[in-house]
Image (cartoon, rainbow, N blue to C red):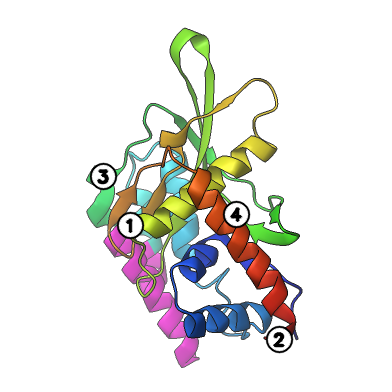
Amino acid sequence: MAKDPSILLNRLALYINSKSARQREILRQRKYPEEEFNLGTYHLESREAISQYLSDGADNTSIIHRSIQSLTQLAPPKVGTQRRINANIDVLERFLELLDKLDFKGGSPSLGQHNPPKLKVHSLPICVHPDINLNGEGPKGKKYIGAIKLQLSRANAFDDDMAGYVSAVLQEYCKEYFAHNGEIVYAPYCQVIDVGSANVFGGVKSTAQRLKDIDAACHTIVDLWPSI
């Protein structure tokens, strides 16, 4: 069944960084999602385990190891399901290799909302869905806020440009939904943890041009959607 126009944040970054044929494929997958390959739930188990580890302060890896053990013991009858389980195990094992790169920049982590609101750009709902929220204190007692996004797909590993777009949107999202009592959106908090490339991309300070690119991409997606 066809879906109304919308896009996942990480897929939007991939869309901007892709050529036209790949862009149409990204939109087609979003408009007509396959039952056995839902991008929003494909890495469900690994995302939940990593998010819990981070929200607990990133100092107890038993959360990750227990999840790996639990997934390893599963024996689903469908090949597609087994492939998905193996992908989650791979994500968790690769995540353990980048723990030394994690840095909350002094912020205190907490789990993102389970069903957060979307950010609309040119009437296109962007599913930002921050995995981790960060709260901290800056000079003179200023309240800092931000959010972290996970990218778990090994096939769609991020580069600096793609992570920069995600960071820019995270900052806009925090301004829209979190900064209501004088809090300051702190760019270094708005990071991307990309397990696919084994990198942690810091938050970008320069967002103006990136937001213009995002605005143009969303406009194009809305125009293209009926023809997909």
Q: In the rendered structure, which amino acid carries the disc numbered 4?
A: Val
- Numbered disc in front, either 4 or 2: 2
> For residue 65, which numbered disc appears in the image?
1
Q: In the rendered structure, which amino acid carries the disc numbered 1?
A: His
Residue bearing the label numbered 2? 227
Give residue 154's quadrant in the image.
bottom left
Residue bearing the label numbered 4? 128
Question: Horizontal and vertical percent for residue 134?
Answer: 50, 34
- Numbered disc in front, either 2 or 3: 2
Mark 3 vs 4, N-terminal side = 3
Mark 2 vs 3, N-terminal side = 3
Mark 1 vs 3, N-terminal side = 1
Question: Is the C-beta separation of discs 1 and 2 under 8 Å?
Answer: no
- Residue 160 sits above or below residue 155 on the image: above
Q: Residues within 10 Å of mark 3 (few under 14, many from 20)?
A: few
Residue interval drawn in magenta:
68-95
